[in-house]
């Protein structure tokens, strides 16, 4: 089991996916094993912009899956986002899983914010024997 945490409050105005700073690496012991990826954090919009944020899970530069539906909120607001993804990488090389995100409709968005109360996002990787 490998885990990574971030307490960084990340702001973006990018409509293309950018790094959230949440990433974790694991080296599978067998090509037949699977990797369970758990992600918990929060994201939302900044200020009174009318926009939506979206996230996705990548493995070593390869897109695996979207994380939840696009989040559209009021002024300003955020919501929890979480995912459990079962990956079959067929590899015994080091793999880095990372969470990327973007604003969908313009404006500004925030990842891992709670507007002053302190937030921690986490990624947990668990190797499952075949």
Image (cartoon, grey):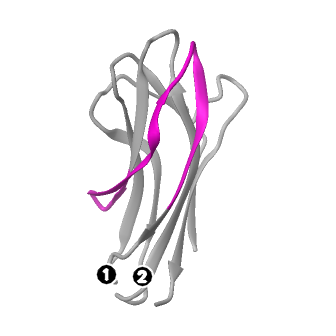
Name the quarter where the N terminus is drawn: bottom right
Instruction: Looking at the picture, tell me which residue is in the foreground, 27 or 126.
Output: 126
Q: Specify the label residue 1 is tagged with.
A: none
- Is 81 situated above or below 16? below
The spot of residue 101 in percent (x, y) is: 39, 39
The spot of residue 117 in percent (x, y) is: 73, 28
Instruction: Looking at the picture, tell me which residue is in the foreground, 9 or 69.
Output: 69
Residue found at x 36% / y 69%: 95
Mark 1–mark 2 CB contact (< 8 Å): yes
Q: Is residue 10 visible?
A: no
The image quadrant of residue 12 is: top left
User: Few, some or many C-alpha atoms within 10 Å of disc 2 (few <14, some 14-19, many ≥20)?
Assistant: many
Q: Specify the label residue 91 is tagged with.
A: 1
Q: Main secondary structure of the magenta part?
A: strand
User: Few, some or many C-alpha atoms within 10 Å of disc 1 (few <14, some 14-19, many ≥20)?
Assistant: some
Quick one: which residue is furthest to the right in this view?
117
The spot of residue 88 in percent (x, y) is: 37, 76
Instruction: Give how far apart the Cα atoms at labels 1 and 2 are.
Output: 7 Å
- Is 127 situated above or below 14? below
- Is 14 situated above or below 119? above
Residue found at x 59% / y 28%: 78
Indicate which disc, 1 or 2, sits on the residue closer to the N terminus. Answer: 2
Question: What stretch of residues is rendered in magenta?
Answer: 57-84
The image quadrant of residue 74 is: top right
Instruction: Looking at the picture, tell me which residue is in the foreground, 68 or 43.
Output: 68
Q: Specify the label residue 28 is tagged with.
A: 2
Residue found at x 33% / y 75%: 89
Residue found at x 70% / y 33%: 118
């Amino acid at each position: 089991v490998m885990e990574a945490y971030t307490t960084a409050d990340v702001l973006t105005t990018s409509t293309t996916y950018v790094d959230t700073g949440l990433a974790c690496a694991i080296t599978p012991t067998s090509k037949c094993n699977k990797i369970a990826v758990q992600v918990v954090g929060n994201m939302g919009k900044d200020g009174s912009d009318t926009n939506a944020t979206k996230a996705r899970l990548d493995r070593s530069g390869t897109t695996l899956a979207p994380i939840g539906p696009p989040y559209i909120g009021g002024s300003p607001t955020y919501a929890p986002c979480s995912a459990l993804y079962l990956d079959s990488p067929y590899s015994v090389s080091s793999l880095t899983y990372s969470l990327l995100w973007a604003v969908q409709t313009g404006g500004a968005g925030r990842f891992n914010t709670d507007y002053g109360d302190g937030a921690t996002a986490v990624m947990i990787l668990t190797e499952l024997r075949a």
